Amino acid sequence: MGGDQAPDMVLKGIKIARTRHPHAHYLLHGNEAVLGPMVERDKTLAEVCDIRHAEGVVGNDEKPSQALRRGRDSSLWQAIQSVKEGEAAGMVSAGNTGAFMAMAKLSLRTLPGIDRPAIAAMMPTQRGDLVMLDLGANAECDADNLVQFAIMGEVFARTVLGLEKPTIGLLNIGTEDQKGTETLRQTSAILKTSSLPIRFHGFVEGDDIGKGTVDVVVTDGFTGNVALKAIEGTSKLYSAFIRGAFESSIVTRLGYLLVRSAVNKVRARVDPRRYNGAMFLGLNGIAVKSHGGTDPLGFANAVGVAVDLVSHGFNDTIKGEFMKVQRASGLDAKGLEEAANG
């Protein structure tokens, strides 16, 4: 029931996902009195959806602590429980990010060696795609958290993007060693001097994201979310500029006919909906966060992320890979900071 236009947007998104993933089945957690008639009116949805009644809904403005206390009857909590209990292989929600993370962490727990899960997603660059984390789950992070994010991001880039030796960058206000907060400088020191088997590039700036300077961009959730929304907004701005330019006169409209295919390719390449669907890395279960303001196409893409992760056994892979990294580096959950002296 989460999202700016739920549940209508969610159901329309599932209908799109139905054509892309015909073998997937869906459990809809929410108010049965609302969902039931909507599903029954559409045979396509009725064939692949079962409804699990949930009275409550976690509001977008609810604090995680409030949601944890009062949200046990909510659609969000029940969906998470369906993953924990094995009834569902994964879940997708466009609802309250903080509540989603808090509930998922409480119920699903984190992988060994991970203190906090992080939201990770792929983004387009001039060189291909990169993965960026955290995108909003943890507003404040210490050096241990950021090092863990770097390890998870490196594993994600290898297993999902297929990169043999992905490079890691810390998002900062400059590339010089003395720039940034004490936490960033401490994290950089750990990644530079430790025995972690990853390729640390160093500090990167905001414009390095679009350049594709590194394959993995690591940051705290506050900065990452601001960067993500700025990138999405800029993409929409330029799309509006281009559309306005071609609609400004008869000549430009005729010109558009000649370059329409190229313009459509560019638009599709940078469309935020294409990259909708971020995974909570570090949890013992597949949990995908959709943008709350997305449309049905964007939500369908988020569903596709979950289906792909489940189909390819991604969580089992990242568990195994992270355990290998830990064994290779000799780190435990609380020993990352000590690696700076290693």
Image (tube, rainbow, N blue to C red):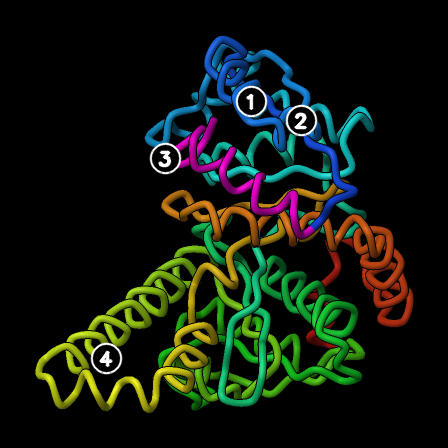
Which residue is tagged 1? Answer: 39
Q: Quadrant of the C terminus?
A: bottom right
Segment colored magenta: 1-20
Q: Secondary structure at mark 3?
A: loop
The Cα–Cα distance between marks 3 and 1, rounded to whole angstroms, is 16 Å
Mark closer to the chain start, 4 or 3: 3
Mark closer to the chain start, 2 or 3: 3
Mark closer to the chain start, 3 or 1: 3
- Residue kind at label 2, given as amino acid type: Cys
Q: Nearer the viewer, residue 66 or 38?
A: 38
Badge 4 vs badge 1, beta-carbon distance below 8 Å? no
Q: Nearer the viewer, residue 313 or 168?
A: 313
Q: Tell me the mark number nearer the camera, choosing from 3 and 1.
A: 1
Which residue is tagged 4? Answer: 242
**Label 3 Cα crowd, 10 Å radius (few <14 / some 14-19 / many 20+):** some
Q: Secondary structure at mark 4?
A: helix
Badge 1 vs badge 2, beta-carbon distance below 8 Å? yes
**Which image quadrant is residue 132 in?**
bottom right
Which x, y percent locates residue 315? 80, 51
Which residue is tagged 2? Answer: 49
Task: Note whether 4 is above or below 31 in the view shown.
Answer: below
